[in-house]
């Protein structure tokens, strides 16, 4: 057998082994040698650990080109951003043990970076061999990961460690990330389940999930870099972007009238008619829970409970201390009408500069003392002079999940006089509004559809 034939034969054997059993081709190696973290993965996937260290999932930051007021030479993200969904970041709220509750004498570990896929010793943005070895590959890639092991603890040196499931059992269940692998972190972001984004990726809530799809079917990674949309609040990105048209094209409907809408109406506007999650938080007033620890006062809605706010968006973002939201208007041909979840957060601002102040959650979580949290954060950030005053910040979150087909907005939902779109606020003249909110726009079409359904 010549060299070329041998290579082909070996390739076919490897492929057959993978396809026939649907198993990871490294199963035998893992069963024999056990799982030793990224070093085991590197036996076949050489260089992937180092590659992962350059991604937003590890760095929690990137250069950002579409947001007002940012330095183009610096990186921004959860590593260093301050905004009122969290009012902190990985710097001031690094994973740590909070002070003991005066009432119970108990403590707990908290931190914005608890979802970071490392061991905390090699933390956000770290590099080098130790950082590579700290990567928790299985938290994303194992369908049998024991998430009970992924919790912080103190080692014999008093260092806070984030635990990992590095068992052979978990390693033998390795494969494409499931929805659970993703949602364990993304569903609980912002301080609790369904707080930040307000969506559950389930068959009842999203048409993609109902078809058996998982997150990475749309968010297809390239070299561990994840494509994302243009959420006004989601700044850090891996440089890869995602849109509905990637799969559905620019003419997704059989109906030509509906296809005409795609030029100025985003798919999400019709196909995501509801949202949920927190609509407001007050970081100046924390409430004590049953466990005697404190949390910021929060107004929360269930998924599919609130209606969106509709606005023109050209994928660039207004960014001021009191507003983070979409830029765009009707005259801008790069703008489309998108749906947004509006969130309002109350926190402390510096009276002298007008800038939002960050808060270290450890003091208020133990005692409810919010100003102690501001003082601790200021010390960490090197801010010596400030005058805290309470104020509100409004944030527009993009509505990109909870996609429905059967409950999508129909013609009259927008074009009736009491429709969901505020045409006046969107920049339409009175004569145009009169024409757009007249039954002539949709009557014949819906009558015909009604006959077909009967």
Image (cartoon, rainbow, N blue to C red):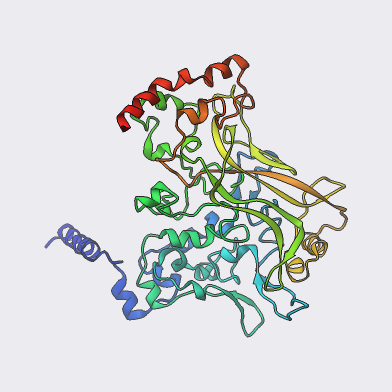
* Residue 275: percent from left, percent from top: 54, 46
> Foreground: 303 or 167?
303
Residue at 55% over, 54% down: 56
Q: In the visual, does 243 lie left or right of 4?
A: right
Q: In the visual, does 389 lie left or right of 46?
A: right
Residue at 76% over, 46% down: 392
* Residue 175: percent from left, percent from top: 36, 63
Which quarter of the figure is the C terminus placed in?
Answer: top left
Q: Outermost residue, top direction?
A: 431
Q: Is residue 206 depicted above or below 291 in this figure?
A: above
* Residue 224: percent from left, percent from top: 45, 55
> Taking the image as drawn, is residue 262 in sight?
no
Residue at 48% over, 28% down: 412
On the image, which quarter does residue 291 sit in?
A: bottom right
On the image, which quarter does residue 123 sit in?
A: bottom right
On the image, which quarter does residue 86 sit in?
A: bottom right
> Taking the image as drawn, is residue 403 in sight?
yes
Q: Is residue 398 depicted above or below 182 in this figure?
A: above
């Amino acid at each position: 057998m010549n060299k070329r034939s041998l290579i082909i034969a070996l390739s076919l054997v490897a492929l057959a082994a993978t396809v026939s059993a649907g198993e990871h081709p490294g199963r035998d190696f893992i069963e024999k040698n056990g799982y030793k973290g990224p070093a085991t993965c590197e036996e076949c996937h050489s260089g992937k650990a180092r590659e992962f260290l350059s991604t937003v999932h590890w760095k929690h930051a990137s250069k950002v080109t579409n947001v007002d007021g940012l330095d183009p030479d610096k990186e921004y993200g959860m590593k260093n951003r301050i905004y009122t969904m969290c009012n902190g970041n990985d710097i001031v709220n690094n994973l740590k043990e909070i002070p003991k509750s005066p009432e119970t004498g108990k403590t707990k570990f908290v931190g914005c970076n608890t979802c970071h896929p490392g061991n905390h010793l090699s933390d956000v943005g770290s590099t080098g061999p130790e950082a590579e070895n700290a990567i928790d590959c299985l938290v994303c890639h194992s369908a049998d990961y024991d998430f009970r092991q992924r919790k912080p603890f103190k080692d014999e040196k008093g260092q806070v460690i984030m635990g990992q499931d590095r068992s052979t059992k978990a390693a033998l269940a390795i494969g494409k990330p499931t929805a659970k692998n993703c949602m364990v972190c993304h569903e609980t972001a912002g301080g609790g389940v369904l707080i930040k984004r307000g969506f559950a990726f389930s068959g009842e809530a999203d048409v993609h999930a109902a078809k058996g799809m998982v997150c990475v079917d749309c968010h297809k990674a390239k070299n561990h870099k994840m494509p994302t949309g243009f959420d006004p609040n989601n700044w850090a990105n891996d440089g890869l972007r995602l849109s509905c048209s990637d799969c559905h094209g620019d003419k997704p409907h059989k109906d030509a009238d509906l296809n005409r809408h795609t030029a100025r109406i985003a798919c999400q506007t019709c196909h995501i008619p509801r949202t949920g999650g927190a609509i407001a938080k007050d970081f100046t007033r924390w409430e004590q829970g049953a466990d005697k620890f404190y949390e910021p006062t929060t107004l929360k809605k269930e998924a599919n409970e609130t209606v969106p706010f509709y606005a023109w968006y050209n994928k660039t973002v207004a960014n001021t201390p009191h507003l983070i939201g979409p830029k765009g208007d009707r005259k801008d041909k790069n703008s489309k009408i998108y749906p947004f979840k509006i969130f309002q957060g109350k926190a402390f601002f510096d009276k002298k500069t007008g800038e939002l102040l960050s808060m270290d959650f450890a003091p208020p979580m133990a005692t409810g003392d919010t100003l102690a949290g501001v003082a601790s954060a200021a010390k960490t950030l090197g801010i010596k002079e400030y005058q805290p005053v309470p104020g509100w910040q409004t944030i527009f979150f993009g509505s990109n999940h909870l996609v429905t087909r059967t409950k999508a907005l129909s013609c009259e939902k927008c074009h009736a006089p009491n429709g969901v779109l505020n045409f006046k606020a969107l920049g339409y003249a009175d004569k145009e509004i009169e024409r757009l909110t007249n039954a002539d726009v949709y009557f014949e079409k819906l009558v015909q559809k009604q006959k077909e359904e009967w």
